[in-house]
Amino acid sequence: MSHQCGQRPPEAFHVLGSKALKGEDVAFVDESIETSACVWKLYCVCDGHGGVGAARFVQEQLITSLRRLLPRGPQPDLDSAEGRQWAEQISSAIAATFVALDEGFAEYRCPSGTTVSLALLSGWLLTVANVGDSEVYLDTGTCVGEMACCHKVEDNKKEQQRLAVAGVRVASLSSTLLGPPLPGEVGVGPLRVWPGGVAVSRSVGDFECGSHVLPVPHIRQVVIPDTGARLLLASDGLWDYFTGLRACKVARGSPLSKVPQRLFKALMFHTDGVLTDDTTILALDILPPGNTDFRHLAKQVRKTSRKKLQSWKDLLSLVTYPLQDTVQEALSFYTDIDAFTHYPRITSRGVAMYRMNKERYAAAWGVPRVVHPVRYGSNMVDLMNDLQLEDGGIGSVEPEGRSGKLVDGDGRRAQPDGQRVEWQLERDVRRPQSGVSQSGGPADAPGRRSPYSVARDRARRITTTRSQQKRTVSKLVSMQFTKSSNALFQDDLNSAIRVDPVGQQDREDIMMTM
């Protein structure tokens, strides 16, 4: 529907509700972003994974980065060529902001990631951009339209094709939950991207997953009708159990202030009262000036759009209306673009910057770097690295054939005086004979071991070593306690208790306690 540039802008009212399980969801609102001649309203929901660091960074930097790139000047008529160009500038500014956030977060060397679903309102033009699976739906009263493109690998066939062309492995988790399934093994859970194991193909952060997990958003723009609309943004804690159509129908009959409460109540009914994930719901009413209730406007729109009875079939459809779903009208988008293909020059260097900063930090602080003979699509090698780096390079096993002796941090024999006991580090990975793995099976290539056997043997040796270390320390403590007990108390021939020589005052205290 056409909106002239001189028309009064709509009024916006929002409500936010959330339930935390891991505390990784972040939502924020700013309704006073001012440029030279325009006021913008921004609403955003972020669902972090691997920590809340990436989501907090987006909350702190998104508005500042976006304000610098938004177009200047008043909003032109959206039906004109200037209006199309103005809307294109908004899309390119949002795409560049997402990439800038990804590159800026790489400076912190944090491996976490986050989905981002952003709604930007300028006049009657609504722009929605997203990466990840925090979906957004728009309800006009007569139709429900999907404003965000879900980047969950399990449901997005186009993203699966893109990853397949890039040579990226897409598979579910193995039964051990430590990586992709072995050949012939049936995985568990939804499809994931390897390496990394994230269930989305686009996000901000997630640098350990490689450059195939993109921070480039999908952008959709729509002109809000004169009768207003209701926008629903939520994290995947809601969309795992609700479709967009059903959630909007549940929210349609509630006042704005009670939309999150109504949806949470319906969600708890489906999950038997158990919260399965962080869930954040942000509802936004975009209404004509002077109106405050979307329910009343939606009823009027449905009443005026209802067809007149022309035959007995129309009467039958009216009678059975509560028993069937109405046919939804298609939502007409002003713009619908994938920034990855529409702006091929907007690319992120976040992964390269993350790796460079990580190597600089390791070189500056002397963090030992463990080099493995193979690389494969699993996080098991990273797990082994973390186990060794947590101990500062100490904690792995001596090679077979050597006597396992307790040594201290300097390589000397540890004395049983209560000081820390550690195992001697052995970094070298011995390669078996050509064509035979150390576990007895065929190797992946002549002259080196299977990657899974390397990870499995390392995990077994580390577990065995730590168990032996605990038993040894326990034995030393027991011996020391026994020796002290024999020195303090000993039964003599008269069945009396002999106490080692002590001071007169201590002797009196001991006798009083006896």
Image: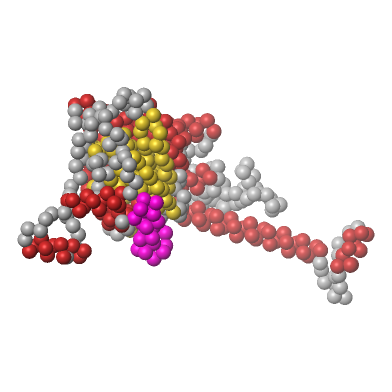
The residue closer to the viewer here, 18 or 437, is: 18
Q: Residue furthest front?
A: 290
Q: For residue 227, which quarter of the picture?
A: top left
Q: Magenta stretch containing residue 269, yes or no?
A: yes
Q: Residue furthest bottom?
A: 494
Q: Identify which residue is drawn at 57% across, 57% down.
A: 468
The residue closer to the viewer here, 419 or 55, is: 55
Q: Main secondary structure of the magenta part?
A: helix
The residue closer to the viewer here, 225 or 448, is: 225
Q: Identify which residue is drawn at 20% across, 35% down.
A: 2
Q: For residue 29, which quarter of the picture?
A: top left
Residue 86 picture location, percent across and down: 26, 28
Q: Is residue 3 left or right of residue 353?
A: left
Tally of numbered tags: 0
Whether residue 347 appears in this view of the structure is no
Where 376 falls versus 4 (above or below)? below
Q: Residue furthest left?
A: 311
Q: Magenta stretch containing residue 368, yes or no?
A: no
The residue closer to the viewer here, 275 or 386, is: 275
Q: Quadrant of the N terminus?
A: top left
Q: Identify which residue is drawn at 33% across, 49% down.
A: 293
Q: Quadrant of the C terminus?
A: bottom right
Residue span colored magenta: 254-276
Where 211 falls versus 245 (above or below)? above
